[in-house]
Image: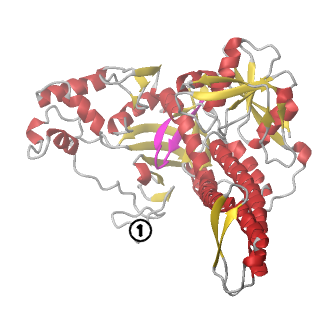
Amino acid sequence: MAFDGLFTHQIIKELSFLETARINKITQPDQYTVILTIRANRKNQKLMLSIHPNFARMHITNNQFDNPFEPPMFLRVLRKHIEGGIIEHINQIGNDRIVHFIINNTDEIGDRIKRHLYLEIMGKHSNIILTDENNKILDSFKHLTPNTNSARTLMPGFNYEFPPTEKKSNPFEVDSIQDALDMSIPIHKAVLKHLEGFSPLAVKELLSMDSDIDRAFNQFMQLIKSNPATFKVDGREDFYFRPVAHSTEIKTYDNLSTMLDDYYKDRAVRERVRNQTNDLSRHLNSLLQKNEKKLAKLVDELEQTKRMDEMNLFGELITSNMYQLKQGMDELKTVNYYNEETVTIPLNPRKSPAENAQYYYKQYNRLKTRKAHAAEQIKATQDEIAYIETIQMQLDHISLDDIDDIRTELAEQNLIKKKHKSKQSKKNKQLSIGYYLSRDGQEIVVGRNNLQNEYITHKLSRNNYLWFHTKDIPGSHVVIMDSNPSDGTIEDAAILAGHFSKAHGSSKIPVDYTEIKHVHKPSGAKPGFVTYTDQITVMITPEDDYVAQLRNNYLNKKVPE
């Protein structure tokens, strides 16, 4: 379900306990988010205001955020005007996705002031605006100038105006809608056009309640007003604040904030990772296409070298028939003394018989050299493709902490340009290692990049530990940190190896496992590349729900690099 006007109405009701509470601290962890730390109910509540183009929202969060050392300008303005202030009221503008905070505070000389904070939850147009008591804009997260937006201006000094919207009816202020609907268009469009704050899903639910529009509307609004609702996330990855007939419940929550915190946590992190690795993904795709074209040419070149033995044979036959050849002949028909078959050998009439023989011997030597070179280059190109595919797989699973490690690795492999970095003591540098607890309580480590793969395989593990990797498929190194693992732990490790691989999402994934003593890194091999023997292969199907359960016992440990 969308974060529509109805959802905004419900979240404001839930956050009403923040009224009369003090704003103790304001932070801005990223370019889309402001966190208000508010003292309410005898504890600090972190109220998130997000204007992310895909995840704009407002709710209490328990997640931890890193904050930039230098506060952005908008954050400085907020701290100056509303930090230490008391929230007088939180209300909704109509039934739209606009939240209005009224905040009482004192200025530098102790005079009482009133400030208005507006959160507009409108997708890519979302914004946060701070105004004075007369609604004159003090600052906004995004500035809209007359040159960039003809509808309104959001700049310091201008009066704040609400976003231009169609004139609709507030569903909390009317009892009947049938007479006001435009019946010249389909009914669901007519309802959507008439009611403020209704998403298409809300309209669908309303229309499913009764064939009579007014009865359906009143039943729906009664449910909204009186039912505390079951907050759920269903199997289609949609969230709801009320029971819906078609949902497949997989999780229920006590309140909207907890639900939103859980629902958006991984999505927001993945979005930040994607934003910070977009350039790497494009570059790796380009390198992969380049190497695949190179491989095709090398394979074609190797195919051509199959004529090598024929060139050598032609040279031999010309030499053995030299006595009957004369310059000016354009071919030689003779018997191949290896198989007694007649062959026709093209000759250059401008060359002597000896020069024709030398030509074929040179072609033989050239193709022989090219064959060795092509075979060597094919192997190197195949290794490069496998390496790039491994990095691409890792980009699908890495955390924000792993991005710099992958960039450093690619720079060391001369696949991207090296960036100048400030000197850092290597002994102080730490590596993040992901630990999972199996169903039987045994630790399983998973490498999310090649630096981690090499560490857990060659430094962290003992010779008799079991090591897991997808068979002939790019993936993470997985090790059970116990010399006597249970069958359930072995299965869990195989599931994690399949999940953290290029084959993620497949129904049947082959996973090899063997003892660490059988895993070796060839001299000069690329990071993360190993060979292994004495393996056992199992077929697994990593289910996302089960992997999520394993994630519940996830622990990130820092170790010296």
Quadrant of residue 227 within the rendered picture: top left
**In the depicted view, which residue is nearer to us: 95 or 54?**
54
The type of colouring in the image is secondary structure
Q: Is residue 361 above or below residue 436?
A: below
Instruction: State left or right for residue 412 relative to residue 115.
Output: right
**In the depicted view, which residue is nearer to us: 87 or 481?**
481
- Horizontal and vertical percent position of residue 342: 63, 63
The quarter in which the N terminus is drawn is top left
Q: Is residue 250 above or below residue 557?
A: above
Instruction: State left or right for residue 142 relative to residue 388.
Output: left
- Horizontal and vertical percent position of residue 515: 81, 24
Q: Residue drawn at (79%, 42%), measured in percent from left and top?
A: 451
Q: Is residue 108 visible?
A: no
Q: Residue drawn at (41%, 49%), measured in percent from left and top?
A: 123
Instruction: State left or right for residue 225 relative to residue 80.
Output: left
Quadrant of residue 327 within the rendered picture: bottom right
Residue type, numbered disc 1: Thr
Q: Considering the whole magenta stretch, tell me its main secondary structure.
A: strand
**In the depicted view, which residue is nearer to us: 443 or 175?**
443
Q: Is residue 471 magenta?
A: no
Quadrant of residue 195 within the rendered picture: top left
Secondary element type, mark 1? loop
Q: Is residue 490 above or below residue 237?
A: above
Q: Residue drawn at (67%, 33%), measured in percent from left and top?
A: 471
Residue at which label 1 appears = 148
- Horizontal and vertical percent position of residue 71: 66, 53
Q: Which residues are magenta?
A: 44-59
Instruction: State left or right for residue 257 relative to residue 229.
Output: right
The 10 Å Cα crowd at callout 1, few under 14, some 14 to 19, many 20 or more, is few
- Horizontal and vertical percent position of residue 118: 44, 48
